[in-house]
Image: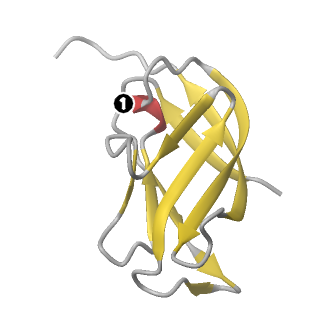
């Protein structure tokens, strides 16, 4: 079963994914990087900190702003979240995701 994520083009909505292992948060500070790949899009906490980042220095929650990804289009995308730590240099398959991206019209400010 996939984790559902929602994004709205050019909006600042944040999706938060708690990194849990057997229902318990991963060890504080153990995770060094997170990579989200869906469709033709690939973002990571090292290079794309406007779109994906850790909530705090414990690195136990990944925050994702799908609507801020460059050139993202309306649609439904299947993908994966991979995390890295000092012992998993090739990454750990963490969770499958389904990203639903929508347009959200607003009046000029």
Q: Quadrant of residue 81?
A: bottom right
Looking at this view, is 58 or 74 the one in front?
58
Q: Going by the image, does 10 lie left or right of 107?
A: right
The residue at the point 34 percent across, 65 percent down is 55
Residue 82 is situated, as x and y percent measured from the top left of the image, at: 63, 58
Q: Going by the image, does 97 lie left or right of 105?
A: right
Mark 1 Cα within 10 Å, few/some/many (few <14, many 20+)? some
Taking 62 as reference, is 78 above or below it? above
Taking 4 as reference, is 70 above or below it? above
Looking at this view, is 91 or 2 the one in front?
91
| Residue reaching furthest to the right | 1
The residue at the point 71 percent across, 32 percent down is 77
Q: Going by the image, does 21 lie left or right of 67?
A: right
The residue at the point 32 percent across, 41 percent down is 50
Q: Quadrant of residue 12?
A: top left
Quadrant into which the C terminus falls: top left
Residue 14 is situated, as x and y percent measured from the top left of the image, at: 41, 48
**Element type at marker 1?**
loop
Looking at this view, is 42 or 97 the one in front?
42
Q: Quadrant of residue 90?
A: bottom right
Looking at the image, what colour scheme do you see?
secondary structure
Taking 42 as reference, is 2 above or below it? below
| Residue reaching furthest to the left | 109
Residue where numbered disc 1 is placed: 11
The residue at the point 27 percent across, 13 percent down is 107
| Residue reaching furthest to the top | 108
Residue 59 is situated, as x and y percent measured from the top left of the image, at: 41, 72
């Amino acid at each position: 079963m996939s984790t559902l994520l929602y994004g709205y083009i050019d909006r600042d909505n944040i999706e938060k994914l708690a990194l849990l292992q057997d229902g318990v948060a991963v060890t504080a500070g153990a995770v060094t990087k997170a990579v989200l790949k869906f469709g033709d899009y690939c973002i990571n906490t090292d290079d794309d900190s406007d779109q994906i980042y850790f909530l705090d220095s414990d690195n136990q929650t990944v925050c994702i702003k799908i609507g801020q990804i460059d050139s993202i289009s309306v649609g439904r995308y299947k993908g994966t979240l991979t995390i890295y730590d000092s012992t998993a240099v090739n990454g750990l398959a963490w969770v499958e995701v389904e990203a639903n991206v929508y347009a959200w019209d607003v009046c000029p400010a």
